[in-house]
Image: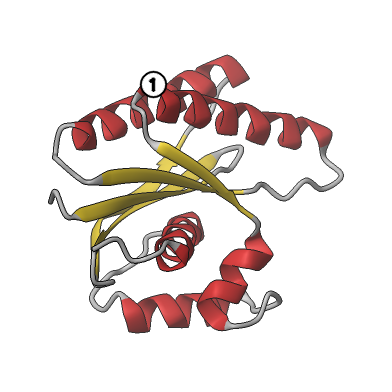
Amino acid sequence: MASEYLFIGIDPGSRETGYFVLSRCCYGCFKAVNGGTIAFDGSLRDRLFEVYVFFMQLFGSVYDLGYAKVIVCIENPYVGKNIKSSFVLVSIRSVIMILSKKFSFEYEELAPSKIRKVLCGRGDADKDMVCAFLNATLRGVCFTSLHESDAAATAFASATSFPNFC
C-alpha cells in the first residue's frame, strides 16, 4: 500500500451523502475499496454530528493503512435557489474539510462539469453516461444510490487527473 494513493470521493447532500473509496497504484490501475450512502435526518446540528462521526471513523480507518497519500475529493455542491439547502451543503463540506485537515489528507473540490468532462469527455454528459463509464471501468461494483455513484465519479475524476507517481 505504500505505493498506492487512496481517493475518497464525497457527494454531499442535505439528507443523504454518498462516499466512495478508490485506490490507485502508481501505474494507474484502480481498485474499488468501499462505498455507500449515509442518510440522516433531524436538526442541522444532528445531521452535522452524524456526518462528523461517520467520516471521523472512515478517515481514521484508512489513516494507519500505509497509503502513500490520501486525497479527499468532494463534488462542489450545486447551489440552486434553496438557500437553506445550500447552507446545509456548505456546512457538510466544512466538516469534511476540517476532518481532512485533522488527518493530514489532501483536499480537493471538483465542479460537476469537470467530473463529467474527465470521465466522459463532455462537461454536459448526463448521469446515465457517467454511470455507464463507471460500470465499464469498475467492473463488479454495484452502486446503491446516485449519491454513491456521484461520489465514485468524483473519486475517479480526481484519481485520473492525478499525475503518475512511480
Q: Residue at x 14, y 48 (%)?
A: 2
Q: Residue at x 49, y 23 (%)?
A: 98
Q: Residue at x 63, y 66 (%)?
A: 114
Colouring style: secondary structure
Q: Pinpoint residue 62: horizontal percent, then vertical percent.
A: 22, 37
Is 137 above or below relative to 36? below
Residue 2 as seen in the image, left or right of residue 81: left
Assign a secondary structure to mark 1: helix
For the residue pair 22 and 160, the one nearer the viewer reads as 160
Picture quadrant where residue 118 is located? bottom right
Residue 109 as seen in the image, left or right of residue 113: left
- Mark 1, residue position: 102
Q: Pinpoint residue 130: horizontal percent, then vertical percent.
A: 52, 76
Q: Quadrant of the C terminus?
A: bottom left
Residue at the right extreme, as displayed: 81
Picture quadrant where residue 56 is located? top left
Q: Pinpoint residue 37: horizontal percent, then vertical percent.
A: 40, 47
Q: Pinpoint residue 108: horizontal percent, then vertical percent.
A: 52, 45
Is 157 above or below relative to 41? below
Q: The disc labelled 1 sits on which kind of residue?
A: Lys
Is 44 above or below relative to 136? above
Residue 115 as seen in the image, left or right of residue 53: right
Classed neighbour count for the residue bearing mark 1: other residues with Cα under 10 Å, few (<14), some (14–19), many (≥20): few
Q: Residue at x 47, y 76 (%)?
A: 131
